[in-house]
Amino acid sequence: MTATSGIYLILATLTHSCTIQTRGRKFELSPGWYFYCGSAMNNLSARVNRHFYTEKKHHWHIDYLLDKAKVAAIVPYVVSDNQMEHELAKILSKTPGLTGISGFGAGDCQCDTHLFFADSLCVQGIFHRLLARQIEITVAKLRKRYIGIETPVEKFRKPWELLVSCIISLRTKDEVTGPAAARLFKEAPGPKELMALSEETIEKLIFPAGFYKTKARNLKKVAEIVHTEYHDMVPEDKDKLLAMPNVGIKTANLVLADGFGHFEICVDTHVHRISNRLGWIRTATPEESEKALKILLPRSVIREVNGLMVKHGQNICKPRKPMCKNCLIKSLCLTGIADETHSS
Ligand code: SF4
């Protein structure tokens, strides 16, 4: 672990009842499991090691506890936003099976306590919820930053428009996709009109989109399918969408999420790259990211993540040189924190 900032969760056992007398308070503790949450805004690694190995200094409440208890595990969580310590305490206070020891180690902060007695072990669930909360906070910051800013393709919101514009957008920049889709919709607003156009006409309308010849051929086929099999209505069904030419999981999820309000995530290169940089997931391909994010992302944000990350990826978190110094979510990002640590 590098010298960096973060929060941590200590899991400790008390084998006997005991009284802990700190400078200001007296706590009667029963035997059992205890969860303690803390933060280290300068050196997380040193703090964790201190709790594991060093002599107790009787400086903090946790020192008094660790004099009597045995540390079973310490789970560090790298983040430089100290708000997350309160979020962790909040999650612990709402976790079934945990009871807060009021006033323990929280004298100088807004939490009621940092120590919780446990009648069950639920570490994994706690950290899953902590990450979900961190994701919500990160998305809220991005939402505030990019509110009112529209990419050239975001004006297309109906299922048919989303399907067609997403096919055109594959390996093509938004600045090219937006006008190309607009030209096509002007000539052919629906599937019936599009299937009536020749491939050559479609090619001319969507040029210079990448692979415009293949896309023109496939768009015509997609129009025929939607017209003849689905009565001009884009099907609200992933398998039916995936059966169409040029439609992959990314396009299908975009249509379902933005066109029909399903809880799906469209993972393009921006979402794949930024989610990994943030430390939300560790995946090698967008396909793996799609599966991981579908499980991880709270429903409250899942449909927004694509649009926000596209804008953040185009402006700040660029593929080659992310501009971490100017990034408003740096304190919630593993890469941003590492960048700060190395440059300080
Ligand atoms: S801190 Fe850097 S890596 Fe993290 S999201 Fe911002 S620009 Fe991207």
Image: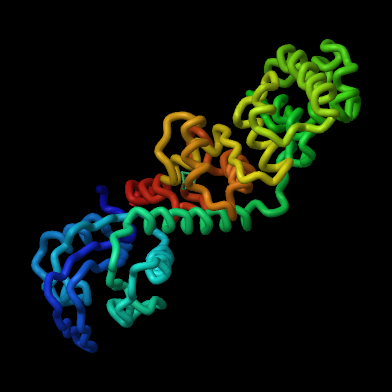
Which corner quadrant of the image does residue 246 belong to?
A: top right
Give the residue displayed 22% in from the left and 67% down from the top.
33
Taking depth in this image into account, of 129 and 317 the one nearest to the observer is 129
Percent position of residue 138, x then y: 52, 55
Give the residue displayed 27% in from the left and 55% down from the top.
75
Q: Please indicate, yes or no, whether residue 315 appears anywhere in the rendered image.
A: no
| In this rendering, position of residue 266 left or right of residue 30 | right
Percent position of residue 70, x then y: 13, 65
Q: Is residue 332 above or below residue 216?
A: below
**Figure coloring:** rainbow
| In this rendering, position of residue 23 left or right of residue 130 | left
Percent position of residue 86, x then y: 41, 69
Taking depth in this image into account, of 123 and 135 the one nearest to the observer is 123
Q: Is residue 288 above or below residue 129?
A: above
Which corner quadrant of the image does residue 85 belong to?
A: bottom left
Q: Is residue 107 above or below residue 261?
A: below
| In this rendering, position of residue 139 left or right of residue 103 | right
Q: Is residue 90 above or below residue 208?
A: below
Which corner quadrant of the image does residue 220 belong to?
A: top right
Taking depth in this image into account, of 45 and 298 the one nearest to the observer is 298
